Amino acid sequence: MHEAGNELGGQFRMARTVPGKEDFGETIRYFATMLHEAEVDVRLGAPIVDAGQLTDNDAVVLATGVLPRTPDLPGIESPGVLDYRRAFSDPAAIGRRVVIIGAGGIAVDLAHLLLDNATKGVGARGASFRAEWGLDRQPVQAQPWRSVTLMRRTGKIGAGIGLTTRWVAVGALRHRGARMITGVNYRAITDTGVLVATERGHEFIEADTVILAAGQERNDGLLRALTSLDIPHRVIGGAADTAGLNAVRATSQGLEAAHDLARELHGRTNTRT
């Protein structure tokens, strides 16, 4: 197993940093332990940059996931612009005024993390929790020092999140002061913010940091070369399709790929004998 990073887990590594989703870290720990017990050769920090590195294998599963999509906008190369992966890796380094382009599940999770990170101190978090759930007769909402604005062109804020949890996640963001805008046409990104157009006209939203969370693209750069090598292979998860991407589907595809390749290799062995 080749992993480009220094730890297994993929997008679970981001999910475990979100308030209330820390158990995703235990999922990573569980599978890492199972791989160790099964004596799987796990190679961390070992990206495959050329399909030629795979020629000694009998079969390959391409589970390289997704890459953040970069929208075609003026100013996208501005120094304060970064993608959601970088934002999850170091939320404390992000500025005080934040604009998130995109407002799906990843953007909502990221907004929760940024606002949680901005509410300093255990006492402040306790006050915020009591105020949110009406546990204090005279609640005082702890005000985060960071402002977050989520925006998207079409659709609802948090589209793609489960129906029974979306309203909770979006409501918590609203309670913490996050601004959420839909029906946005992006005009330009500058060093000081984002210019957008809505049905109310043009608006410039000031920002120290602009985070791109406007969807994903398949990270399948090895697929064409892998196909030309005539090695039995399967593509799973986000590397196969970004639509409706979720961990349950990706895990199921991984199991199916393992069974399919085992049968295919067994058939080739029988044919040779």
Image: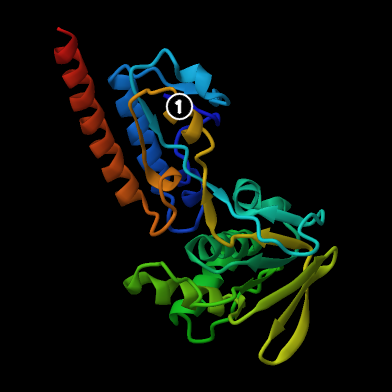
Q: Badge 1, how many Cα within 10 Å: few under 14, some, many 20+?
A: few
| In the image: residue 85, left or right of residue 105 | right
Q: Residue at x 60, y 55 (%)?
A: 69
| Closer to us: 55 or 22 | 55
| Closer to us: 49 or 166 | 49
Amino acid type shown at disc 1: Ser
Residue at the far bottom: name it. Answer: 200
Q: In x, y percent, where is residue 267?
A: 17, 20
| In the image: residue 67, left or right of residue 144 | left
Q: Residue at x 48, y 46 (%)?
A: 11
Q: In x, y percent, where is residue 17?
A: 51, 50
| Depicted 188 relative to depicted 56: above or below | below
Quarter of the picture holding the C terminus: top left
Question: Element at badge 1?
Answer: helix
Q: Residue at x 32, y 73 (%)?
A: 164
Residue at the far right: name it. Answer: 191
Q: Quadrant of residue 243?
A: bottom left
Q: In x, y percent, where is residue 81?
A: 74, 57
Q: Quadrant of residue 49?
A: top right
Q: In x, y percent, where is residue 38?
A: 28, 20
| Closer to us: 13 or 55 | 55
Q: Which residue is mark 1?
A: 228
| Depicted 257 relative to depicted 102: above or below | above
Q: Residue at x 38, y 59 (%)?
A: 244
